[in-house]
Image (tube, rainbow, N blue to C red):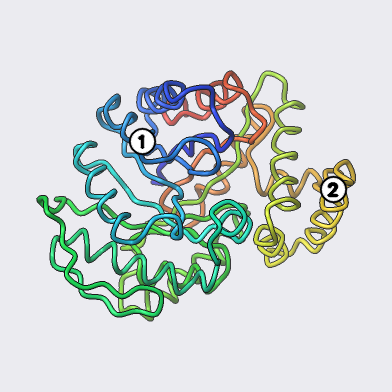
Amino acid sequence: MTAREIHLPVAAQPTVDSLVEYARTAEDAGYDCVWLPETWGRDAVTVLTSIAEHTDSIDLGSSIVNTYSRSPALLGQTAATLQEVSGGRFRLGIGPSGPIVIENWHGLEYGNPLRRTRETVEIVQQVLSGEPVEYDGHDFSLSGFRLRCTPPDPQPPVEVTGMGPKAVELAGRFADGWHGIMLTPDGTRDRLEDVERGADLGDRDPEDVAVSVGVTCCVLDDPARARDLARQHVGFYVGGMGTFYRDSLERQGYDEAAEIHDAWQADERDRALELIDADMLDQLCAAGDLETARESLERFEAVDGLDAVMVSFPRGADESEVSETMAALAPTGD
C-alpha cells in the first residue's frame, strides 16, 4: 500500500508554531511522514527540531536541504542529532538544488551537482556509521572525523532528490531513497526505471530504495480557486525556477513546456498559465473538488513501485486552504 505523506508548504509561514501545528494535524490525520523544505524562509533544522519535540509518532524529514550550504560532515552531525531528538523518526532528504539558489542566494559555485550529491551521500553515510571518516573524492577529502556521540540506531536513511535520468539513477545506486516532483503518473514510471537501473549498477535491490513523489494538491469548497492556485504553482516552477522543471515536462512529452517557460520569462504570465491546460493540470496535480483530486491522487498511488505520495500545496495557498486540503486528503478520510 502506498503511504500518504505531507510536504509542508514551501511558501513562508507566519510562525514556527504554524508549521508545528501542521505537523501535529498531519499526525492526528494518519499521514505517515511530514517533510519540510528549506528555501528562503526559516532554516529546516531548527523547525524540524521543534516539530520533533511536539509530535510523537509521525516520521519527519528534510525535503530538501541542499548539498552546498552545509558540509557533508555537518549534514551527518545534523542527521544524527535530529534522529536523537525525534526518537528515531528522522529521514534526511538532500539534493543539489539549482544555480539560482546556490549561486545567487548562497554565493557558491554550482559545479557538478551529480558528483557533489554522490560524494555527500557517501560521506554522510560514513558519518552516521560512527566510524572514522576517510574519504578521498573530487569535491571533498576528509580524514579523521568521527562522531563524538553515540551513533544513531537505527541509522536515519539518506534520501536524495533529482529530476533527470542520471540524477535518479544516482539515487538508485547510492541513496536510501529518491524524491520526485513535477511528475505525471507515466513520468513517475519512467523515473522508476532509472531507479532500477541505478540499483542494478550498485548491485542493490530496487526495493531497498524508498521512492516518494510530491503531488501538488488543493481541495477547496471553491474548486475553481483550487485549480487556479495549482495552475499558478506549476507556471511559477516551470517558468521561474530555472530550466529543470521545463526540461522535466518536455521529457514527459509536454512540448509546450518551453513555451510556458519563455512566456513566463517574458512577463507574459497570463499566456503561460493558459498553456497549462486541464489535462496537464490533472496529470501533474490533484486539484479542484474532492472527487477530482482523489481520482488524480489515486492514479499516482496505483503506480507499481511507488512507496509514498507526498501531498504538497500550491505556493499561493493560505493557511486555511492548506488545512482544508490536508483534511480532505487525509488517509483516515479515505
Residue 202 coordinates in the image, percent (x, y): 34, 78
Residue 144 coordinates in the image, percent (x, y): 16, 70
Residue 289 coordinates in the image, percent (x, y): 67, 27
Q: Is residue 58 left or right of residue 333?
A: left
Q: Earlier in the sequence, mark 2 or mark 1?
A: 1
Q: Residue at x 26, y 72 (%)?
A: 142
Which residue position is annotated with label 2?
A: 272
Q: Is residue 321 left or right of residue 160?
A: right
Q: Secondary structure at mark 2?
A: helix
Indicate whether 307 appears above or below 312. below
Q: Amino acid at mark 1?
A: Thr
In the foreground, 240 or 162 = 240
Q: Is residue 28 left or right of residue 7?
A: left
In the foreground, 262 or 221 = 262
Q: Secondary structure at mark 1?
A: helix
Q: CA distance from mark 2 to mark 1?
A: 37 Å
Q: Which mark is residue 136?
A: none
Which residue position is annotated with label 1?
A: 46
Residue 12 coordinates in the image, percent (x, y): 56, 31
